[in-house]
Amino acid sequence: MEIKYFDNAATTKVKEEVLNEMLPYYSIQYGNPSSLYTIGRYTKRAIEKARKQVANLINCNSNEIYFTGSGTESDNTALKGIAYANKVKGNHIITSKIEHPAILNACKTLEKQGFKVSYINVDKDGIINIQELVNSITKDTILISVMFANNEIGTIEPIEKISAIAKKYNIIFHTDAVQAVGNVPIDVKSLGIDLLSLSGHKINGPKGVGALYVKTGINFDRIMDGGGQEKKKRSGTENVAGIVGLGKAAEISQKNMQKHINKLLDLREYFIKQIEEKIPEAKLNGSRKGRLPGNTNFSFKNIDGQTLLLKLDEKGICVSSGSACSAGNSNPSHVLVAIGASKEWAKGTIRVTFGEENTKEEIDYLVENIISNIKV
Ligand code: PLP
């Protein structure tokens, strides 16, 4: 059966050009980048090229990019690294209620270690309450971490406003941009971002590789001890092929950004229009316009999202019920709870996220199959 894949927020397919760029680093170019002989220097150069490609995508300098093993690791390094390096200044962190578990669980760990965390509410569209954020700032606040765009409902947060507030109060600002990178143009300089997390597998690159941007002058503690790779900030022999793949994916993403966004917007609007016409009581969660170009998240009445997901799977269709990270968990999604969805509506939710390879014919097939599983 041919697969119709609509879960690009969970992961994306590695582009052929990306894979081709990676393959030599699993075979002929296997040198350890820390080795001084020729094949070691060669892989070291490949890493530095990738660093430049990633830096170009978000408009920073190469030496501000640290490679990690995932978006999750980037988030943990940002939160714990900044918290530990600044604990003499204060012990208070501000974040939102709709962050990814990589942030929320890192915050829980920090709370156990004596840090205080404020979790800011969002409105019905998922946009952070700016006034509440300002009100929660204390003399001990050392870090604000708010995601660029939400992984479940796609809402894009007012990053420029948040960074301006952070700057005004001399607080470090981190954003988890794992979902936004490649789908929204990001210029860390003009947006005033101090730290930013990204991940390879969300931008048609490989899994198991991520990057953390840290603005020059901002100190952070390492969370991994070892041989001192990545300027002593992230030890562990580099995942060279993965890093090369992330670099290539970043380069392609930068080059094709507007085309990619336009394609996804077209597919998203086509899908939303069909669902709204054919299932009038369906609810679109998240902001109608201020959302990721490829994201939709619908709640349906009197259905179970996970059952619908499995029914669609029988037809070769991949969607997510809420977020992949909470799949298998029967509690309502913390994001849907935060935007005020009732337990009943939250239960009937599926996330459909588009990629460049999707077509309108595939969407017709998806809609047909959603309708046949829902009593309209
Ligand atoms: N942050 C967000 C917003 C995400 O959507 C994800 C993955 O779904 C992550 C962090 C974690 O990234 P990774 O899968 O690379 O660990």
Image (cartoon, grey):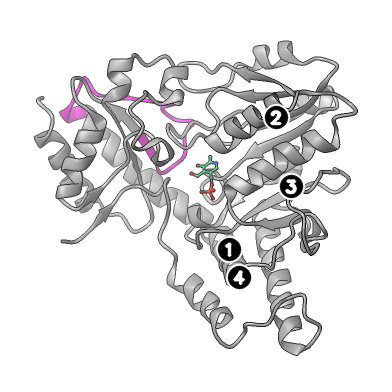
Q: Which residue is mark 3?
A: 223
Q: Which residue is mark 1?
A: 246
Q: Which residue is mark 4?
A: 244
- In front: label 3 or label 4: 3
- The crowd level at tag 1 (other Cα within 10 Å; few <14, some 14-19, many 20+) is many
What SS does tag 1 mark?
Answer: helix
Q: CA distance from mark 4 to mark 2?
A: 33 Å
Q: CA distance from mark 1 to mark 3?
A: 22 Å
Closer to the chain start, of discs 3 and 4, is: 3
**Do residues under tags 4 and 1 come within 8 Å of each other at their CB atoms?**
yes
Name the residue nearer the viewer: 344 or 155.
344
**Residue 57 position in % (x across, y down):** 64, 56
Assign the C terminus to one quadrant of the image: top left
What SS does tag 2 mark?
Answer: helix
In the image, is residue 123 part of the stretch drawn in magenta? no
> For the magenta stretch, what is the residue range?
277-296
Residue at left offset 67%, top offset 12%: 131
Q: Which residue is mark 2?
A: 110
What SS does tag 3 mark?
Answer: loop
What SS does tag 4 mark?
Answer: helix
